[in-house]
Each structure stands twice: as C-alpha cells, then as structure tokens.
Image (cartoon, rainbow, N blue to C red):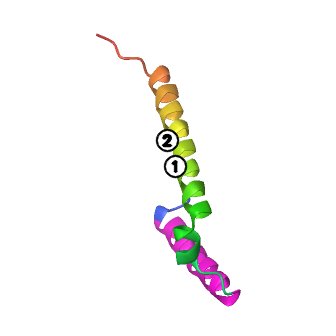
C-alpha cells in the first residue's frame, strides 16, 4: 500500500533536486516567471487545468446522479 506521506516526501525531494539542477545550469526561476512568455505560458496552463478540472467534476457528477 502506498502511503501519502511517502509520495509527498518524494515530491518534495524531486522539487528540491529540480531547483538545484536549474541553479547548476544558471537558470533563474524568477526570470522565467516574470518574463512575458513565462506569464503567458502559466496563464495558458492555468486555463487548461481549469477546463480539465471542470470536465472531471462533470464526469464524476454523472457517475453519481442526485436523487430528489
């Protein structure tokens, strides 16, 4: 059985390793986030995630219809 704490620790570890790798190659996350292209990409990703979330909610609601 997979425990959520194990998954969370692995995720935190991967994020730290990713940030260290970006730092090693001299890539600034702040510069990426503050650039016009970065902001546009984040806005597009947010839009896609919103659409996907709404579709998932509708799908789950269709599996369990409300009975009056």
Q: Is residue 20 magenta?
A: yes
Above or below, comparing residue 63 to residue 31 in the picture: above
Q: Is residue 18 magenta?
A: yes
Q: Quadrant of the N terminus?
A: bottom right
What residue occupies the far left of the structure in this picture?
Answer: 68
Q: List the residue tagged with mark 2.
A: 50
**Helix, strand or loop: magenta stretch:** helix
Q: Secondary structure at mark 2?
A: helix
Above or below, comparing residue 4 to residue 10 in the picture: above
Q: List the residue tagged with mark 1.
A: 46
Residue in front for this viewpoint, 25 or 57: 25
Residue at left 60%, top 56%? 41
From mark 1 to mark 2, how far is it between C-alphas? 6 Å
**At which x and y percent is residue 24?**
68, 89
Q: Quadrant of the C terminus?
A: top left
> Quadrant location of residue 26?
bottom right
What residue occupies the far front of the structure in this picture?
Answer: 36
> Quadrant location of residue 13?
bottom right
Q: Is residue 24 left or right of residue 31?
A: right
What residue occupies the far right of the structure in this picture?
Answer: 25
Residue at left 33%, top 12%? 67
Above or below, comparing residue 67 to residue 38 in the picture: above
Classify 10 Å Cα crowding around label 1: few (below 14), some (14-19), many (20 and above): few
- The answer to whether mark 1 and mark 2 are in CB contact below 8 A is yes
**At which x and y percent is residue 47?**
53, 44
Residue at left 67%, top 83%? 21
Residue in front for this viewpoint, 67 or 38: 38
Classify 10 Å Cα crowding around label 2: few (below 14), some (14-19), many (20 and above): few
**At which x and y percent is residue 66?**
36, 17
Residue interval drawn in magenta: 5-25
What residue occupies the far top of the structure in this picture?
Answer: 68
Q: Secondary structure at mark 1?
A: helix
């Amino acid at each position: 059985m997979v425990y959520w704490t194990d998954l969370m620790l692995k995720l935190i570890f991967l994020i730290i390793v990713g940030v260290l790798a970006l730092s090693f190659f001299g890539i600034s996350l702040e510069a990426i986030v503050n650039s016009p292209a970065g902001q546009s990409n984040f806005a597009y990703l947010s839009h896609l995630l919103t659409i996907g979330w709404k579709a998932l909610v509708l799908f789950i609601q269709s599996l369990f219809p409300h009975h009056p």
